[in-house]
Image (cartoon, rainbow, N blue to C red):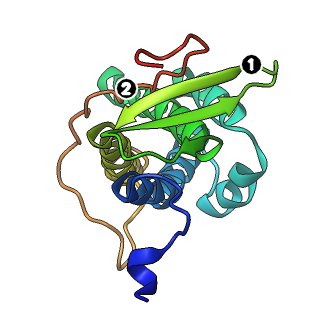
Amino acid sequence: MNETLDWPNPPAGPKDSILAIGVVSVNYSRLEFALTCMFATITGSSLKFASILVPKISNQFRTELMRKMLPTKDWPEDVRDKCDHFIKGFWTLAENRNLLMHSSMIASTQKATTLYKTTKQGNTELCRVSLPELQRVADDMMTYFNYGLHLSNMINFELLGIKPREGDFAYFAWPDKPPLPILLEYSSDPLPGW
């Protein structure tokens, strides 16, 4: 028996979808690092302090603090706009991650993967998502990881006068805003074809 090909047994769902959800998990950890860098930059805290605080507070509180501090910064409007764009993108990606990590998968051989979860109100919600949609969530997380690091470093080096240390990512231009990610849609209404 080839354990790689036969695992998991019984199948948990389409293997490509399971792989994509695994990449979402890994890329979200990367994205949280970029969030920590952006949090430190926007709030004016050290990266060490942000690294201790950020894991202890909710995404809602993280983004709320960043949004409240952003208008206090004497930065060019386009830089504040890029920061706000990162916060919006992070929020959507964090919601997608939470939906995916707290869902069960219906094992099937369909092209679309069906996920379901029970809400705090006791309702069951379903989402039918294609492999390209799952891959897009993972890819968007990597895009926002890169965008957040790039933006944080540009603010630190160009606006705050922090000197890069050996090994720091060196950027020479401000990043372009990536497209905003799309929120996965869960519904308590029956899915078509059910």
Disc number for residue 81:
none
Which amino acid does the dot numbered 2 rest on? Answer: Ile
* Residue placed under numbered mark 2 in the picture: 182
* Image point (43%, 29%), residue name: 128
Q: Is residue 135 left or right of residue 123?
A: left
Residue 156 falls left or right of residue 10: left
Q: Nearer the viewer, residue 124 or 194?
A: 194
The residue closer to the viewer here, 27 or 103, is 103
User: Is residue 115 in sight in this rendering?
Assistant: yes
Label 1 amino acid?
Asn
Vertical arrangement, residue 110 with respect to residue 120, above or below: below
User: Eyeballing the image, is 76 above or below 32?
Assistant: above
Badge 2: few (under 14), some or many (20 or more) residues near its Cα, within 10 Å?
some
Q: Position of residue 100 (x, y in %)?
A: 55, 42
Going 42% across and 51% down the picture, which residue do you hit? 156
**Gap in angstroms between the C-alphas marked 2 and 1:** 23 Å
**Alpha-carbon neighbours of circle 1 within 10 Å: few (<14), some, or many (≥20)?**
few
Instruction: Name the residue nearer the viewer: 143 or 13.
Output: 13
* Residue depicted at 62% across the width and 57% down the height: 46
**Residue 168 in which image quadrant:** bottom left
The residue singled out by tag 1 in the image is 123
Q: Residue furthest left?
A: 173
Q: Position of residue 6 (x, y in %)?
A: 44, 76
Residue 188, x across and y down, in percent: 61, 14
